[in-house]
Amino acid sequence: MENLKEKLNLFSLGKEEPAWFLEKRQEALALIDTLKLPSFQRAKYNDFKLLNQPLAENDFETSEELSANILPDFLGMENQPFLFQTDSVTNFSQLPQDLIDAGVIFCDLQSAIADYPELVKKYYMTTAVKADENKLTAFHSAFVDNGSFLYVPDNVEIKEPIEVVFAQTATNRAYVKHVLIVAGRNAKFSYLERFIAPTESEVEISANIIAEVIAGPGSTVKYSAMDQLGKNVTAYVNRRGYLLKDAMIDWAIGVMSDGNILADFDTDLVGDGAHSEIKAVAISSGQQKQIIDTRVTNKAPHTVGHILQHGVIMDQATLTFNGIGHILKGAHGSDAQQESRVLMLSDGARGDANPILLIDDNDVTAGHAASVGQLDPSELYYLMSRGLKEDQAQRLVIRGFLGSVITAIPVKKTRDEFIEVIEGKLHAEI
């Protein structure tokens, strides 16, 4: 531990971090061995490598080749806030002048730590996610290497989507990214993020991604994400919203990675009238294991939490959906609804859809639906009777099955890319 502590000190020094952030790292490092891994219903992940390679000798190197190949595809958006990061290095960022004048802050996490310390101190792992929750959150707080920070002041509405791309090329250290988003009172905007990691590598690495969204009173946040981590990457992904009075977060999350995934998609409705819609889709293939917990906790009266999860499983893969709706005592007048559905395209696939409702108050509404099954033959027959081949009909039905997230993505180019990713995964099977 002492050796790792010294490496962590050098790591922080190399990033020129202030003393208060290094102290947070050191406190989290000391917690790792004292905390347990998070527990997931009906799912075991003992074979997941989630804590390996936290640091390496060349922590400040990055791949110029990947930047040169990928970055040009995202340029040319003159009026759109955009940030591109390769490994721990920010290659490109832009924010229109009118948004700067309105007080919007949009930068990488390391810049935010240096330039806006009071805001980062106030919100970074203090409200939505805390370092001492479990072993994986402590690991994250100790070894985070960069990420992004977005602050939208009160009463500011941003028309163009805010886009972030995180690309990973290094195979000798963990991929630890933190997204911190703060929406002021009555702020309104759309946010889109993508995580990309190599699809082919002989080295297994771990990824640890945490996104915190603090939604102020009356704010509206549309949050879209597409994860495309490689087969060699075993990832823990924790996205969590913290909603104050009358705030709204509309989540649309596509889990399109090829490696083993442990995901927490959580929303805490802490203010009266807060509202969350969570739409998550996933495709599992090969020998992949994916465990996805999607939870909404109604902590205040008249709050609304809806969960929609759809997944497709191929080959010998496994996919577990846990949908958890929890209405706490005192949250009268609240609503918790959820739907989890899984399609299995192979006899060797294994799927599980677990609805969980925890109701601690009266005068509420709650419901759930869950199913695990194969493609509907009548739908295929109908499409084939209209001239489509069987494989075309199958892909069309599956695309429609996953369409809830596709249609929610705010950028057409990304929607098209999402469809291409789905088609690529299905083409390998069908």
Image: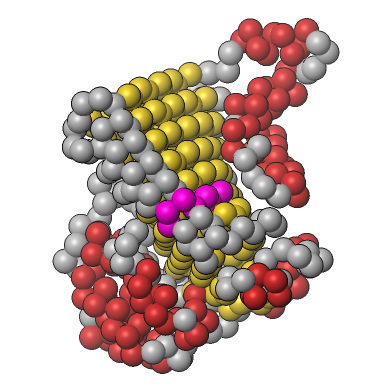
321 in the magenta segment: no
Residue at screen point 39% across, 89% down: 18
Colour scheme of this structure image? secondary structure
Residue at (49, 22) in percent of width and height? 347
Residue at 32% over, 24% down = 365
| Percent x, y of residue 26 | 27, 81
Total labels: the figure holds 0
Figure quadrant of the C terminus:
top right
Residue 221 part of the magenta-drawn span = yes
Is 61 or 31 nearer to us in this picture? 31
| Residue 412 image point, x, y percent | 74, 46
Residue 340 screen position, x and y as percent:
44, 28
Asked if residue 283 shows in the view, the reply is yes
Which is nearer the eye, 161 or 136?
161
Q: Is residue 150 above or below residue 256?
A: below
Q: Which residues are magenta?
A: 216-223
Task: Decide which of 395, 77 is in the foreground and name it.
Answer: 77
For image coordinates 44% across by 21% down, the residue present is: 372
Q: Nearer the viewer, residue 50 or 217?
A: 217
Left or right of 388? Residue 232 is left
| Residue 267 sits above or below residue 194 on the image | above
Q: Residue furthest front?
A: 155
